[in-house]
Image (tube, grey):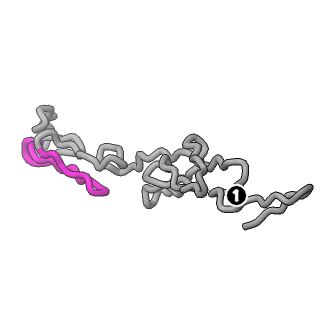
Amino acid sequence: MYEWRNLNETSCTCDCPSIYSGDVCNICSLTCMNGGMLNETSCTCDCPKIYRGTMCESCGLSCENGGSLDEKECSCNCINTFSGLYCKACNLSCRNGGNIKEDTCTCECSSQFFGKQCESWYIYLVGNVVAYT
């Protein structure tokens, strides 16, 4: 319960802070948004991890690796091969023994392979190199 009350001597009622109501400001009137849960003891909202603000009204996501924030949905639109809530996860699999470079989410291919996922290979002919997919 909120302890601060301001008595309006003209109307003989309490002037309550905006989140409280009732004759003696003892009712929490806060409305939580976006799945936030009201803690009536402290008259605060416990927000899901992606929301912020007194009433969980603001998206608190920060998108990484070039992802863009969709404020309305409070989600990240990830680009290239990144995925996940914050676009941190590399969603790429390298073929033919290639290794993922986690910092750039790209494949590092061995000398005879190339392509985004090391899916193509080179055929060496005497004097010429021919690419084959």
Q: Which secondary structure lies at badge 1?
A: loop
Please report the bounds of the magenta region as a residue range. 21-40
Nearest the viewer among 111 and 30 is: 111
Count of marks placed on residues: 1
Three-letter code, disc 1: Gly
**Residue at screen point 62% across, 57% down:** 117
Farthest residue to the front: give it: 126
Q: Give residue 128's position: percent from left, percent from top.
A: 90, 58
**Residue at screen point 28% across, 47% down:** 47
Nearest the viewer among 40 and 100 is: 100
Per the picture, the main secondary structure of the magenta-coloured stretch is loop
The N terminus - image quarter: top left
Q: Residues within 10 Å of mark 1 (few under 14, many from 20)?
A: some
Please tell me whether residue 35 belongs to the stretch shown in magenta: yes
**Residue at screen point 35% across, 44% down:** 52
Farthest residue to the bottom: give it: 133
Determine whether, in the image, residue 45 is placed left or right of residue 120. left
Determine whether, in the image, residue 63 is placed left or right of residue 4. right
Q: Give residue 46's position: percent from left, percent from top.
A: 23, 45
Q: Give residue 4's position: percent from left, percent from top.
A: 15, 32
Determine whether, in the image, residue 18 is placed left or right of residue 125. left
Q: Which residue is mark 1?
A: 115
Please tell me whether residue 15 belongs to the stretch shown in magenta: no
**Residue at screen point 62% across, 50% down:** 107
Q: Give residue 110's position: percent from left, percent from top.
A: 67, 48
Farthest residue to the top: give it: 4
The C terminus - image quarter: bottom right
Nearest the viewer among 42 and 20 is: 42
